[in-house]
Amino acid sequence: MESSSPTVDSPETDRDASNKKDAYRWMVLARTFEDKIGALYRAGKVVGGVYLGRGQEAFSVSLGVHLDQARGDVFAGLIRDQAGRMAFGESILDAARTYLGSASGPMRGRDGNIHRGRPREGLPAMISHLGASISVTNGYLMAKRAKGESGFVGGATAGDGATSTGAFHEGINQAAVEKLPLVVAVADNQFAYSTPTASQYACQSLVERAKGYGLRGVEIDGTDLSACLDAFWEAVSRARSGEGPQLVVGKLLRLAGHGEHDDASYVPDSVKAGKYGRDCLEVAREQLLADGVTEAELSEMADEVQEEVEAAVSQAQGEDPPSPITDDWKAISTDSLLEGER
């Protein structure tokens, strides 16, 4: 068991994906977009729940930037993985269209506002049932293996609450037995909705569970972008080179309620003021400034991101929702069968 951020010696070209400035931009994009979606929700413009990843962006983006669609990788993110999904390849327009019910979106304006994905591109639709995405990712990886493909990695995310489910246990156990190239990112944000971790598990840290499954596990400060980038670079590299599943546990705090309907009043002030209550965007910003990035560059980045968000939301708002009168409502997956194709 390891409990600190791993470090490795490697050619700088291998670390291009972990460029801190690029990762930070994805974080800012995710935060800006979700702030916009939260405002639209409060204005009654978004139907259904809204669940924000505020405070989890550094941990999420660090997995997303190290996965590569072109190599056949898979990213199975959850409700707080906007940053990672975008870094992996999800367009901001796909996200905006789904939240706003556009029929031009990847789910054609159906199936809620967060269960979106493009499975053929390695982005399975998000699953609300905790822990279930691990077994789905396993299925992707085993199918690729059976087809003779190689060099791919699957990334699946979970929260601390998900680790208490049977689906999590079964998925992790299968991945370990099959030695699948899987990286599981567990965001330990200290609460499963309103249930504190002390009421969820008795071990000192969730990373201790890795040994029981025969995995390599590391625990990191999930608010520290540098630590997250290093940890996921090594985890993905190990999985890709045939060393089997990797578990990365990030300690952090959800800086919002479980959803926008929840005020998080159950989180003690002492926890909010603790080490993991700091904002990962502010931490990353300070790291970039220390690396020599200027305030002017960061300001320009923020302006560009704001324009990108406004453009995507404006386009999605102007598009038609699905029509109950004219639309063909058969399931997307049955199109080829109904058309007689094989």
Image: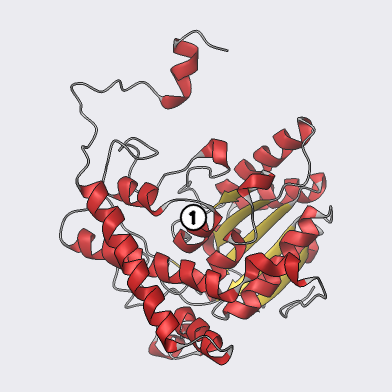
Residue 204 figure quarter: bottom right
Q: Residue, x 53% and y 42% (percent of image)?
A: 124
Q: Position of residue 86 (x, y in %)?
A: 48, 57
Residue 200 visible in the shown view: no
Q: Secondary structure at mark 1?
A: loop
Residue 31 figure quarter: bottom left
Instruction: Identify whether 336 is placed above or below 175.
Output: above
Q: Position of residue 329 (x, y in %)?
A: 31, 23
| Display coloring | secondary structure
Give, as a three-letter code, the residue at label 1: Leu
Q: Position of residue 244 (x, y in %)?
A: 80, 54
Q: Position of residue 170 (x, y in %)?
A: 68, 47
Which corner quadrant holds the N terminus?
bottom right
Instruction: Identify whether 266 is placed above or below 273.
Output: above
Residue 293 visible in the shown view: yes
Residue in front for this viewpoint, 254 or 17: 17
Instruction: Identify whether 299 is placed above or below 81.
Output: below
Q: Residue, x 42% and y 26% (percent of image)?
A: 332
Label 1 crowd (10 A; few <14 / some 14-19 / many >=20): many
Label 1 belongs to which residue?
78
Classify residue 91 as left or right of residue 328: right
